[in-house]
Amino acid sequence: MIQSMTGYGKSEVQLASRKISIEIKSLNSKNLDINARFPVLYKEKEIEVRKWLSKELQRGKIDLSFYIESSGEETSTRINTGVVEGYLTQLEGIRKETDVLSIAMRLPDVLKTEREELDESEWQMIEGGIAKAIVQLNDFRSSEGSQLKLDFELRISLLQEKLARVIEIDPIRLDAVRTRLDKAIQEIQVNVDENRFEQELIYYLEKFDITEEKVRLNNHLDYFIESLNQSDSNGKKLGFISQEIGREINTIGSKANFAPMQKVVVEMKDELEKIKEQLLNVL
């Protein structure tokens, strides 16, 4: 089952002194591109989480964000009382009538930040939140993928219908080419060797023969549907198949030399472009 590269997952983890919201967003990209914004406290886990995301999400532009909301009285920032008392002593000796405390609190080194140590039990809860967000994102991708699959099936069925139209037109096209050549010979009013003319006509018609292209195009369309129904999502493989489909359509167009068939070829190219645009979003 194919998956889209577009997805979104979110979870919340309530710890003793803070609430952490975890968001993972995914957009289409040729390769895997992870942008992770880790809080300082959890920075040491970044490489581990990146490997985890690489394994689970495989491909796409991934954004991982943490939003921390303090929900307790604990804080890592402390007032450096020794520094404040020193400032107050100096300021009181200078200006008695001034609110020296408000001045002292704005001076350097009054606040100090104490480095917190990572709590492994808390991190296990955060890991659970990340796992939940990944599951949500993959569910989102699968839902988007099912819609893409329906669209691909529609486009391929339209291409198959247009290929059937090409097969139907082909004998008429060859008769038209033969008639056009006969008329050209008659207009120049020259005597020609019938056997030689027939040989040249066969050679000429072989140059415009599209039998192989019709067979290969039909096989590529069947293979696209077969790959679409496989258990894994392989957007690159489907992209390669679409390139082969395009190659056969282009060859039919270059050999057509017949307006009704060329019109069908243009319609086929239009449907194929829609497929290629959507394939950019497939994992």
Image (cartoon, grey):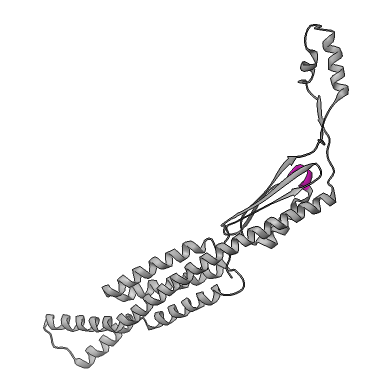
Q: Vertical placement of 274 versus 87: above or below?
A: below
- Residue at x-position 24% and y-position 81%: 177
Quadrant of the image for the N terminus?
A: bottom right
- Residue at x-position 75% and y-position 53%: 47
Front-lying residue, 247 or 161 = 161
Residue 48 shows in the view: no
Front-lying residue, 212 or 272 = 272
Residue 140 picture location, percent across and down: 60, 60
Residue lying furthest bottom in this view?
195
Q: Is residue 158 left or right of residue 6?
A: left
Front-lying residue, 244 or 50 = 50
Front-lying residue, 251 or 89 = 89
Total numbered badges shown on the rendered structure: 0
Quadrant of the image for the C terminus?
A: bottom right
Residue 198 on the magenta segment: no
Q: Quadrant of residue 134?
A: bottom right
Residue 42 on the magenta segment: yes
- Residue at x-position 82% and y-position 30%: 112
Magenta residues, dominant SS class: helix
The magenta span reads: 39-43
Residue lying furthest right in this view?
82
- Residue at x-position 87% and y-position 13%: 89
Residue 209 picture location, percent across and down: 34, 82
Q: Vertical placement of 251 versus 10: above or below?
A: below
Residue 93 picture location, percent across and down: 85, 8
